[in-house]
C-alpha cells in the first residue's frame, strides 16, 4: 500500500476491530503488511 494516509486509516480500522494488532505492532520493528481484498469481476 503506497498511500500513507490510506494505510493509516485502514490500520486504525484493523486495530479497532482487533485491538491486539496494536500490541503486535509495538513488539516488532517491521511494518505489518496490509492488503485490500476486492471481489473479482468474472
Image (spheres, rainbow, N blue to C red):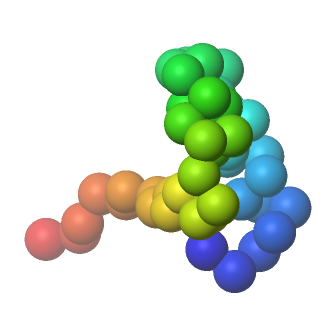
In the rendering, at what x and y percent does residue 34 appear? Answer: 51, 58
* Above or below, 39 relative to 24: below
Q: Nearer the viewer, residue 24 or 41?
A: 24
* Above or below, 3 relative to 14: below
Residue furthest to the left: 42
Q: Can residue 20 be seen here? A: yes
**In the rendered image, which quarter contains the N terminus?**
bottom right
Residue furthest to the right: 5
Q: Can residue 14 be seen here? A: no
In the rendering, at what x and y percent does residue 3 appear? Answer: 77, 74
Q: Nearer the viewer, residue 42 or 12?
A: 12
Q: Image point 81% across, 69% down: which residue?
A: 4
Quarter of image, res 37: bottom left
Q: Nearer the viewer, residue 16 or 26?
A: 26
Q: Image point 61% across, 42% down: which residue?
A: 27
Question: For the image shown, how many numbered marks are present on the structure?
Answer: 0
Q: Image point 37% across, 59% down: which residue?
A: 38
In the rendering, at what x and y percent does residue 39 appear? Answer: 29, 57
* Above or below, 25 relative to 41: above
Quarter of image, res 41: bottom left
Residue furthest to the bottom: 2
Quarter of image, res 6: bottom right
**In the rendered image, which quarter contains the C terminus?**
bottom left
Amino acid at each position: 500500500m503506497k498511500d500513507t494516509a490510506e494505510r493509516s486509516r485502514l490500520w486504525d480500522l484493523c486495530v479497532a476491530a482487533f485491538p491486539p494488532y496494536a500490541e503486535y505492532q509495538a513488539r516488532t520493528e517491521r511494518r505489518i503488511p496490509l492488503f485490500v481484498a476486492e471481489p473479482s469481476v468474472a
